Amino acid sequence: MTTFGKSIRIYLKDGTVTGIKFGEVVNQTIQSISCPRFRTSELKEYAEAKRPGVYFLFGQDEETGDPKAYIGEAENVFDRLQNHITNKEFWNEVVFFVSKDENLTKSHVKYLESRLIQIAFFTKRYTIDNYNQSQLSSLPPADRDAMEEFLTYIKLLIGVLGHKFLEDVTTTSKKKEEHIPLTTTIQDSEIVSMKSNLEIFLSVSGLKAKGLQTDEGIVVLEGSEAAKDLKPSMPNGYKELRDKLIINETLVLENNKYIFKKNALFDTASPAAAIIVGYSITGPQTWKDKYGKTLKEIEEERLKTQ
């Protein structure tokens, strides 16, 4: 299937990146607005905020410090946000999505809410404040397909606005569809090729790990091993990161080794390697492809061929 580029238009109401922001996909009906919590009252001035839509509340989990989100829907987004000001403390930003042609109905936004919660639980990037996945509302086939298209634009805009939590860190291949829980429905539009990702491996001191080099960094895959103990050369920043992975149960101790129970995304190769071996190590020279070439060698070859 051919993939085409997309043009995104962002309007900064105050001329600053921290204020109220309007976003849209050029030539599409979707409209997004991002607003800081303490300025929510200003949304009453905008007709878009009083339409049916879906919204995201963003903040930090009070226990782990991880990013946290709540996903909701409303026939009047502004009215619903007034309730959340009093009954939800964690959030400091709201991003909501409506249609410029005002064709979204209650059934449409209920469908979108359910699908978005479903996707967010599947990707596991953020802590999700929703306790239950609501049932998909019944829509005619044409409306359902229209909402699935609307979802693709929500994922684009929310990512551009700084929240990539609806994207699978591994850019899921069709093979992974076999491991999706039966209670989860993942649409074909979310299952994309891994051709752009490089499969890499680490084998040091009896520890074995498998990962992917993606556009975002290094993803250490579920099932990879990590050392139980740390050595003095382990940088403090990496120690804190490792502790966080243990607290959120990404790393679980089994038979004198830690095992990755979830896919874990790292910005670069070195922290991904250090978390595994338990000491400071040069990632580009440790991670290798299936032919035994290091990431450093691969990157140098790519530079020469450009």
Image (cartoon, rainbow, N blue to C red):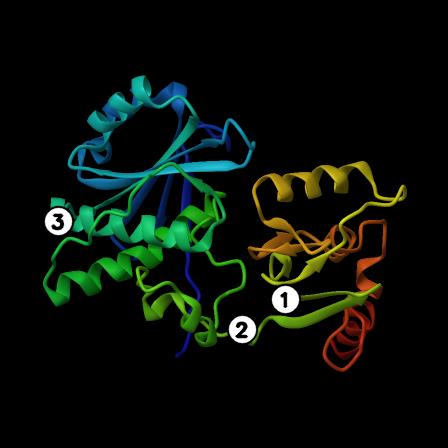
Q: Which residue is mark 2?
A: 194
For the residues labelled 2 and 3, say whether their Cβ atoms are less than 8 Å apart: no
Determine the image quadrant of residue 244.
Answer: top right
Q: Quadrant of the N terminus?
A: bottom left
For marks 2 and 3, give the CA distance: 34 Å
- The earlier-in-sequence mark between 2 and 3 is 3
Q: Residues within 10 Å of mark 1 (few under 14, many from 20)?
A: many
For marks 1 and 2, give the CA distance: 9 Å
- The earlier-in-sequence mark between 1 and 3 is 3
Question: How many marks do you count on the picture?
Answer: 3
For the residues labelled 1 and 2, say whether their Cβ atoms are less than 8 Å apart: yes
Q: Residue type at mark 2?
A: Met
Seen in the picture, residue 19 relative to 223 is either above or below; the reply is above
Q: With 196 as the anchor, is 137 left or right in this view?
A: left
- The earlier-in-sequence mark between 1 and 2 is 2
Q: With 223 as the anchor, is 75 left or right in this view?
A: left
Q: Which residue is mark 1?
A: 212
